[in-house]
Amino acid sequence: MIPLALDPAQVVIALAGSGPLAVRRLTQLREGGADPQVFSPEPDGELAALAGDRLVRALPEAADLDKVGVLYVMGLGTDTETALAELARQRRVLVNVEDVIPLCDFHSP
């Protein structure tokens, strides 16, 4: 692994997920200056409120990922997370699937 820091003004970041891990990661991304699009087919109230108008109530499709440089994924179940990681890589998007090291191109604290 090569340590690096991303400038959210230069790299488009998206999040696909649900649950407390998604809320935590979205909060961290916002604290770092990012305003990611949030994809969540069934967001809980807290995630929906936090995401606001950046919420898309669906999973990202290939066309969505063509506009993204980095994708964070969490809380969607193994099959969905694996499929999203594969789709992201096909679109040349760096992906981090929370707590699933084999599906991560990078790690975040």
Image (cartoon, grey):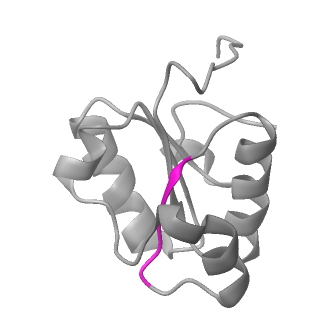
- Above or below, 79 against 60 in this view is below
The reply, left or right, for residue 35 in relation to residue 81 is right
- Residue appearing at x 49%, y 24% in the figure: 11
Query: How far from the left and from the top, in percent, is residue 65?
Result: 29, 45
In reply to whether residue 39 is colored magenta, the answer given is yes
Determine which quarter of the picture holds residue 94.
Answer: top left
- Residue appearing at x 17%, y 49% in the figure: 63
Which quarter of the rendered picture does the C terminus lie within? Answer: top right
- Above or below, 33 against 98 in this view is above
Which quarter of the rendered picture does the N terminus lie within? Answer: top right
Query: How far from the left and from the top, in percent, is residue 53?
Result: 51, 67
Query: How far from the left and from the top, in percent, is residue 97?
Result: 56, 52
Q: Which residues are magenta?
A: 36-41
Specify the farthest residue to the left: 63
In reply to whether residue 83 is colored magenta, the answer given is no
Front position in the image: 4 or 23: 23
Query: How far from the left and from the top, in percent, is residue 79?
Result: 39, 72
- Residue appearing at x 36%, y 33% in the figure: 93
Front position in the image: 50 or 63: 50
The reply, left or right, for residue 47 in relation to residue 81 is right
Determine which quarter of the picture holds residue 21.
Answer: bottom right
The reply, left or right, for residue 23 in relation to residue 88 is right
- Residue appearing at x 19%, y 51% in the figure: 62
- Above or below, 8 against 13 in this view is above
